[in-house]
Image (spheres, grey):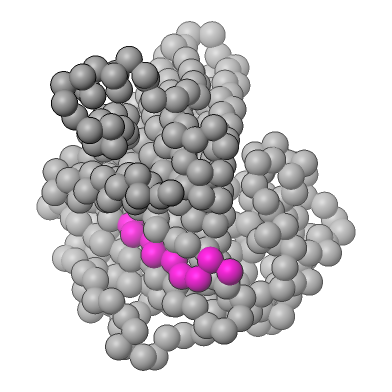
Amino acid sequence: MTAAVQQISDPRLENFRPLASGADAALAGLRLPTRHDESWRYLKVNDLFGQSWALARPVVDAARIENRPGLMIINGRLWAGLNELPQGVVRLAAVPAPAAVLGDHGPAALNAALAPEPLALQVASGRPVTLKMSYLTIPGHEQELSPSRVVLQVADGADLTLHLDSLGGDAALTWMDTVIDLRLGGGARVRILASVRDAGRHIQVVAATLAQDAELSLTDVVFGGRLTRRETQVALTGPGGVATLHAAYLGADADHIDLFTQVQHLSPGCHSVQVLRGVLDGKATASFQGRIVVAPHAQKTDAHQSSRSLLLSRAATANAKPELEIHADDVKCSHGATVGELDPASLFYLMSRGIPEHQARAMLVDAFIGEVLDAIADTEAAQRLREDVAAWMAGREQQP
């Protein structure tokens, strides 16, 4: 967050003080964002921070749980212990303090104060490791918040593939609030495939710190939601680091989607790419803010950003705000953002070949989103997401 921390506590924190379980000191002086904060200007922040919440209750009824591989975090708590940790991953006894890359990030600090069972894992070097984590929210009978915090320390030279699935609950009652703190050692490689299908309110912050020659590849796919914010903060702290961020969103009806990325080039010779593709229908709204920050000594930086949004309805709204903050002179940096509709010439061409209009539209949407899905190394996972995109599009074509 760019705004300074206020000495007087934000009065909205009174909504969360009953949830802090004696951690009132962690809330003192904490500042929550408003729409006057540039990085939160498009989000309906009072729909999150301006309301009273109860902490989501632990789930004890196994019959309500969909069996999924890997670790499951349900209503902010680890389900059924750690019996599915893959070889090469161990649990740490102590959970480290929030990463420096988050700075004075108020929502992340609130998450750290409220998360009932924070989890810290260490990934060792050696053979490649695949870890699957599912976040689930099971609604109760009142507005409930499910905060969770995971720290992943990836050792020098380690190789990790991480699957993150977020499945939310009732649009009126649930708020899933997740922080994932990644710390990549020298030469570590991490590939993340994340998806969210959350009908309610949803915030996920991924904070990644990359040491020398570390590589991070993150692909994030968002399927709507009443209010969804996906935030990625990357700090390239060692020379030779590489960060590749791909994201795709699909919104319909009254969905509200907010994506924010910030990549800080803090060391020479680092490379970053950001690619966003979005599709909106109905009265959906989506916003993308992407920042590239190059420190004065981060010469030989190579950083690029591309944002494209496709509107299937004239009532939909897409906002794009790319930013470059460059303090070095020997760099290659670029950004671009477009918002448009389906190309009528391409649609006519497909229909002239005998393809029905609804199928032709679906093919064009698939090709558009495919620019993100093609970056997924796991071909089976990419195919499943393509099928999900096709199902989403089929549902839109059936709308009156």
Quarter of the image containing the N terminus? top right
In the picture as drawn, the residue positioned furthest to the right comes out as 8
Q: Residue at x 44, y 30 (%)?
A: 310
Residue 107 % position (x, y): 63, 57
In the image, residue 316 lies at what x, y percent? 55, 37
321 horizontally vs 210: left or right: right
Q: Is residue 390 visible?
A: yes
> Is 94 located above or below residue 311 in the figure?
below
Question: In the rendered view, would you say 21 is above or below 69?
Answer: below
Q: Is residue 167 magenta?
A: yes
Give the magenta range.
Answer: 164-172
The reply to whether residue 266 is in sight is: no
Q: Is residue 2 magenta?
A: no
User: Looking at the image, which residue is at 40% across and 18% down?
Assistant: 302
Depth order, front residue of 344/220: 344
Task: Name the residue: 39% across, 25% down.
Answer: 342
Q: Is residue 374 above or below residue 15?
A: above
Choose between 73 and 396: the one closer to the eye: 396
The residue shown at (61%, 81%) is: 142
Front residue of 161/381: it is 381
Which of the 4 image quarters holds residue 213?
top left
Where is residue 230 drawn, in percent x and y? 49, 48
